[in-house]
Amino acid sequence: MSQANGGTSKKCILAVDDTAMVLTRISDILNNDYEVITVNSGVRALKYLKQEKPDLILLDIQMPQMNGIETLQVIRAMKDRADIPVIMLTGVEDKNFVLESAKLGICDYILKPFYSGALLERIQRVLEQGK
C-alpha cells in the first residue's frame, strides 16, 4: 500500500465513544487522513493508552461505567500520556462538563451531531498547535 503523504506515517487518533454509530462516523470521516483507533469505553481507552500513545484523543463525555471526565482525569495522571491533546465530544451542551474538562486541559470540544468538515478542521488545528 503506497502512502500518499510522502512516506510519513499518518497521525494516530484514538476515538472513544460508547455509541458504535458515532465511532463508525468518526472513522469514515478521518480514515483518509489519519490512523483511527476506536474503543467503546473509557476503560478500554485506558487499556490502549498503557500500550500506545496516539497523537490526539477524541473523547465522549457521557459514557457508562467511566465517563469522559473520569477517563480524562486518569489520562492526565498517566506518565508520558498527560500531554496528549484531547477534544471532548458531547451530545449535551452542559456547561459544567465543559468547565470540568477545561480544567483538565482539553484543547477543544465538539457538540454532537458534528459536521465532518468541522471535526477535521478542529483536529487539524489542535495537531498543528502541538508541533
Image (spheres, grey):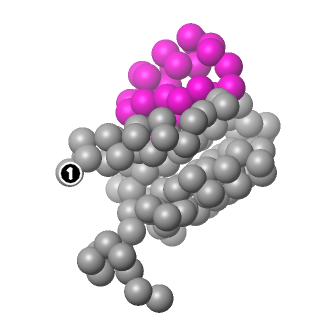
Side of 85 where 67 appears, left or right? right
Q: Residue 65: say if magenta.
A: no
Q: Which residue is mark 1?
A: 131
Q: Range of the magenta residues?
A: 85-111
Position above or below: 1 against 64: below
* Residue 65 rendering spot, x and y as whole percentages: 77, 39
Position above or below: 36 against 115: below
Query: Is residue 50 among what the camera can see?
Result: no
Position above or below: 68 against 55: above
Give the residue at x 67% y 50%: 25
Residue 94 sits in which quadrant? top right
Element marked by disc 1:
loop
Q: Is residue 76 or residue 41 the one in the foreground? A: 41
* Residue 118 rendering spot, x and y as whole percentages: 48, 36
Q: Residue 105: say if magenta.
A: yes
Q: Is residue 59 or residue 71 the one in the foreground? A: 59
Crowd around label 1: few <14 · some 14–19 · many ≥20 (10 Å): few
Position above or below: 97 against 107: above
Side of 36 where 63 appears, left or right? right
* Residue 120 rendering spot, x and y as whole percentages: 45, 45
* Residue 55 rendering spot, x and y as whole percentages: 39, 56
Give the residue at x 61% y 57%: 27
Residue sitting at the far top: 95
Q: Is residue 50 or residue 9 the one in the foreground? A: 9
Give the residue at x 42% y 22%: 103
The amino acid type found where label 1 is placed reads Lys
- Count of labels shown? 1
